[in-house]
Structures are given as C-alpha cells and as structure tokens.
Image (spheres, coloured by chain):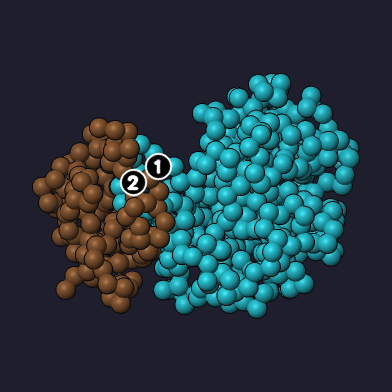
Amino acid sequence: MSKASAPRSPRAAIVGVAESDLGYTPNKTVLQLQAQAARTALEDAGLSFDEVDALFCAGNWSWSPTLTLAEYLGLRPRYSDSTNIGGSSFEAHIEHAVAAIEAGLIEVALIVYGSTQRSDRSRGRISPAYRLTEQFEGPFGLPTPVGAYALAAMRHMHQFGTTSEQLAEVAVATRKWAMLNEKAMMRDPITIEDVLNSRWIAEPLHLLDCCLVTDGGGAVVLASAERARQTRKPPVWVLGHGEAHTHATIANMPDLAVHQAAIASGQAAFGMAGLRPEEIDVAEIYDSFTITVIMTLEALGFCPLGEGGAFVSGQRTAPGGPFPMNTNGGGLSYCHPGMYGIFLLIEATRQLRGECGPRQVPGARLALAHGTGGVLSSAATVLLGKD
Amino acid sequence: MSEEATYALPQSDPESAPYWEGIQHGELRIQFCTSCQRHVFYPRTLCPHCHSDRLTWVSASGRGTIYSYTVAHRAFGPFAAEAPFIIALVELEEGVRLMTRLLDAPRERLRIGAPVQVSFERLSGRPPLPFFRLAE
C-alpha cells in the first residue's frame, strides 16, 4: 500500500441515489429507465433538475449518451462526461466529478446508467466483422466476457491453487445477502454443491459463478461540500478515489492472475483517504464473476496476492460474517444490467446512511465501492464515509 | 454471401495485411522492434514497449506453451454449434502472447505450460487461422 499523505477534507459528497425498475422491463425504454432513476435520486437529495450542472453517463445504447440523455431530460449541462471504461465507469465518473468540483467548474453532478439488455436479448450478439485490435481474437469464438474471465480464473488456479469451491463461496455468500433484499432477482438459497453442479459456461466457471443478465438503471447525485450540507439527507463523503486501466483484450492482460488495474486504483484511493483496507466496514466489490471478486480483494490489499480464495472461505463475506461484502446481493444475485458499477455506489451510500433494513451492516462508517470493467481491463475505487 | 456467413471473418486492414497474408501462406508473422529488441504482437505502428517506429516483420517459430485455457461450453453466433471447444492463450517462444483455439487436445494432456505448435487450418469453411495443437 502506498504511503498515505495527510487526508484532505472531503470536497464532495453523494447526496442522492436511486435505482429504476430492475430485472425484466420490456415495457420501458433505456431512456425511461434513466429518467426514472434520475428523478428518484434527485428527490432523494432534495434537489431539482434545474440545479444539475453536470451530466455523466456511460452506455452502449447511443454514440453519445450524454447528448441524447440531456436532451431527453431537458438538461443543458455545462459539463458533460460519457467516459466508458466498462462496468467501472461510474466509479471513474465520481473521480471526474470530484475533480470538476475541486476545479470550481460544477456544483451538482448527476451520474446515470440504464440498460435494457435483457429485454433486447443483446448479450452475446456477435459483431459482423472483427475490426482493429479485435481481429486477432474474435475469429476464435471465445464467448466474452465470460470466456476471458475463465482464462483468468484458470491462470489464478494454476498460480495460486485457488479452487472451484472457493469461487463458489462467493456466489453462496452473495446469495445470502440477496435473500435479505426484496429488490434482488435471485432469492432462493444455494449451496457450494449447487454452484459446482450448475452447468459449465466456460471452464472453470459454472453458471452460478456468473452474474445475472438483467435490465435496469440507477442514478447517483454528487454535490460540492457546500451544497451537500444543504441537502435532504446526511452527506456521504467521498474520501478517496482512483482509477486505472491496463489492457482491452484478454490476450493483452499483463498477468492474468493479478488485477493490476485494481492495485493502482486501490492504492490511489486509500492513499488519498489516508485509510487502510482493514478499516473498511462494508465493501461493495464488482462481481461480474466469482473470480472477479477474489482477484479484486487481493489487489485492493484486503489479503495478500493469491490468498483471495482462503479469504472468502467459510462464508466470511456472508451476513453476520467478519467481512460484509456485496450486501445488496451483488451482480450475482440482485441485478446486473451490463455495467453494474452504479449499483455499488448506491448500496454503499445506503449502508452508510443506515437505510438497509434487514441487510444493514450495524454501525457502518466507512465503505468501499470498487468497479471492474471490460475483461479485468479497468478499475475504479471510491472510498466513502459519513460524518 | 449471406450476412450470417460473413460473421466470424477477421477483417484485414493496412496494418494487419502482412499478418493475414502470412496465414494464407502457412507462416506466422509477428513484428520485431529493432530498437528494444523485443517481439511485438498484434501489429502496431509504434512499439508498445519503447515507442520506436522501427518495427519489422519476422516469421515466428510457431512454437510456444499454454499460458491459460478455457473450455467454452457455450458460444455465440456461428460458433455456437462448435461448442465445446478449447480456447487458449499461447505464449510463443519469441515472448509474445496470442489467443487461439487448441485442436484435438485430449483432456488428460491439457495443462498450463504444455508445449504447443501452430497449425494453419480451415474450420467450417472459414479462411485459415493459426490454430495450435499439443506438441508431441
């Protein structure tokens, strides 16, 4: 972990969060979902659309999602950012929005995501031709992203001795959290054996090692420190943030057993906040696949490299365990509309506010939201705290 | 040619044309940076290690080892009917890594580190690709 400099007083806070309808929403467009989430998040903050001066959006539904969404919502933002680095985009948006607030360019940022991938049946659609850097991988037929994560999992097992049972621990613990969240899509209990007996998707990953494919959207409102003190609910302060990416295609990942982007983003975030991993009360960690979680826990320094499998064993991340993680049920059991990162921020905020009912982590004061995008390509880490 | 039939075809471009022409002739061509003396794959204009533009084409040995692999039990589009199949990342002797499919590899011999050899073959009537087979 990098040597922490003296932590600065927070410049910005999350003041509003909301989901849209989740799951299967065939009667709503991707714009309707985002409008629903945006309005609810602003209501949560006690702010109006007129007070939004920056729009952040990532999505594959438009060549320029912020242009389309701003027009649709009747916004004329003076700051626009449609950075798309995959599922971690929204944690990166937090970093960019905090920087814009610090620069004095904006005061209130609206970060929005929506997807109708389940209704559209767009997952796994093959592009008509493989162009540019994709031409060297596409013709071999690897199903992505799952096949790429399977390659990483196989390498991790080879290098560190990680087992299928350890991967399954993540899926089982996350399902237990989903059983406490009425919005979660999958709420029936599962066992390690259920995961191991579910069908292969790409070895060593079984069906239950993989995230859901759902529709859904979410929104987060971030405000300057001055504005945050005037909003409806107690501010959730951004204490640290970091982002990094290392590659785009899986053959070009520097080391398939090490999530190097997360090492970089985590060190930046913890260094800025002056915090250590063991101080975190609740962790929301991108779980596109069970292996994603294990590699991220190692990279962020919650355990040494190669010990992620042992770290999650014995249901240590389940409700009542010593390491509360993915408390909404995660992408594995709650929802996963393609780019899941916005939901990590929503859940971390609600945990710090104490709004989580049966799944509330008692006394949570410090939370981590960590997004991973592409094929372990990008990472962005956000550390949050309450007064 | 129907739209479906054009799926899964690699699209050559001015930068990659020597690579794909090599495949047609049974030769695995990669780049070599004469500034930092490292091999480079996929083809680029600037070396990703030292950012020199002194890249030349060389013929790779076609020998390497399995860096990682997966057995894909589900695949999409034209590949769906071919599942299950083995995708591997192969590290060539020259030090570069590439994606491929391993052909006719018995499960009991499939392991990370196993030596493999390139084999240019046509699958399902598609143009030839650099597949790999386990070396004897």
Percent position of residue A146, x then y: 47, 56
| Residue drawn at 28 percent across, 75 percent down | B109
Percent position of residue A154, x then y: 42, 68
The 10 Å Cα crowd at callout 1, few under 14, some 14 to 19, many 20 or more, is many
Q: What is chain A's hue in the picture? A: cyan
- Residue at the farthest left position: B25
Q: Nearer the viewer, mark 2 or mark 1?
A: 2
Percent position of residue A277, x then y: 67, 65
Q: What is chain B's hue in the picture? A: brown
| Residue drawn at 62 percent across, 62 percent down | A3
* Quarter that holds the N terminus of chain A: bottom right
The answer to whether one can see residue A339 in this image is no
User: Which corner quadrant of the image does residue A263 belong to?
Assistant: bottom right
Chain letter of the residue beneath label 2 in the structure image: B
Element at label 2? helix
Label 2 and label 1 in one chain: no
Percent position of residue A112, x then y: 67, 37
| Residue drawn at 53 percent across, 45 percent down | A86
Pick the front one: B45 or A102: B45
User: Is residue A196 found left or right of A142 in the rendered image?
Assistant: right
According to the picture, the residue beneath numbered tag 1 turns out to be: A126
Chain letter of the residue beneath label 1 in the structure image: A
According to the picture, the residue beneath numbered tag 2 turns out to be: B78
The 10 Å Cα crowd at callout 2, few under 14, some 14 to 19, many 20 or more, is some
